[in-house]
Image (cartoon, rainbow, N blue to C red):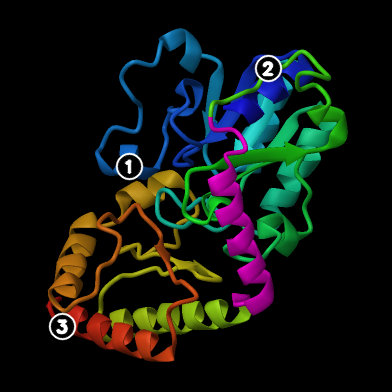
Amino acid sequence: MSAIRLARGYTGRDKVIKFAGCYHGHVDSLLVKAGSGALTLGNPDSAGVPASFAAETIVLPYNDLDAVADTLSASPGEVAAIIVEPYPANCGLILPLPGYLEGLRKLCSEHGVVLIFDEVMTGFRLTSGGVQNLTGITPDLTALGKIIGGGLPVGAFGGKEEIMNHLAPLGPVYQAGTLSGNPLAMAAGIASLKLLKKTDPYDRLDSMGKKLALGLSSMAKDRGVPLQVPQVGSMFCLFFTDEPVTEFEQAVRAKHEHFNTFFHQCLKNGLYLPPSSYETCFISAAHDSDTVAKTLDIFQGAFSSFH
């Protein structure tokens, strides 16, 4: 919410581009074709959002650069920001096609649009520098959360000095909150980030992620079950479909009843997956090779229910 407000204040423009299936919190103007819980409940557009608010939000398909280019060309000087989960993880896990994020960066620079990376999900989960560190792409603003509070409620945003200087008291864009800089959340976040820096678990997490993804794919193939398992670092998901999923509508078309069957078979055997096919699975530093082996055994048993 604050990053969007800042982008609008900085550019003097009103419209925002987001992508179908990406979830950026429950701020009114972004609850349009959102993912996460809203999608799981079959209601990606929330009641209570005035149509006039939603009218300022342009929703485009992820991984379609032409759609972005056409929209920016058709609306010169109107779009303040493009906000994106660089790896959308609230409608399952969707990975960017080669050149897609680079293309967004280029288009934003050409049209004077603020590029916002929502790394609430990916920040400190994939590397200490998030997707922008993995890809070498620098957004104008970044939103962070979750791990930076060590499990306590917190959100943060930051970016280029020229833009951040438009925040009060230096500039005209107001931002405040009762719990801003809450000492308990900050202490927990600092402790968590220090621990991540000390233990550097990212290579091990990626190795476990690859092992689980490859195992799932192999088991599904042996059973003749259509399955896609996109994976990056400690993140992976299950799309029961023949085609690689590169955008929201393909995620919706996956066979969610297959996921439900798989979920309950796993649960019966002590493995609790996220209870929605639109959620992403996460491995944590607490998991080890024995955990992965046990998980693969339970996956194997769950596939036996498919005939």
Residue at image position (38%, 51%) is 251
Label 3 with label 2: CB-CB less than 8 Å = no
User: Looking at the image, is 195 positioned above or below residue 37?
Assistant: below
User: Looking at the image, is 198 positioned above or below residue 72?
Assistant: below
Residue at image position (51%, 37%) is 24
The percent coordinates of residue 147 (x first, y second) are: 54, 56
- SS label for mark 2: loop
Residue at image position (60%, 29%) is 17
Q: How many marks?
A: 3
Type of the residue with mark 2: Tyr
- The boundaries of the magenta stretch are 179-202
In the picture, the disc for residue 304 is: 3
Label 1 with label 2: CB-CB less than 8 Å = no
- Can you tell which of label 1 and label 2 is closer to the viewer? 2
Viewer-closest of 59 and 87:
87
- Left or right: residue 248 compared with residue 114: left
Quadrant of the image occupied by residue 304? bottom left
Label 3 with label 1: CB-CB less than 8 Å = no
In the picture, the disc for residue 174 is: 2
Question: Badge 1, how many Cα within 10 Å: few under 14, some, many 20+?
Answer: some
The percent coordinates of residue 22 (x first, y second) are: 48, 41
Type of the residue with mark 3: Ser
Residue hosting label 1? 37
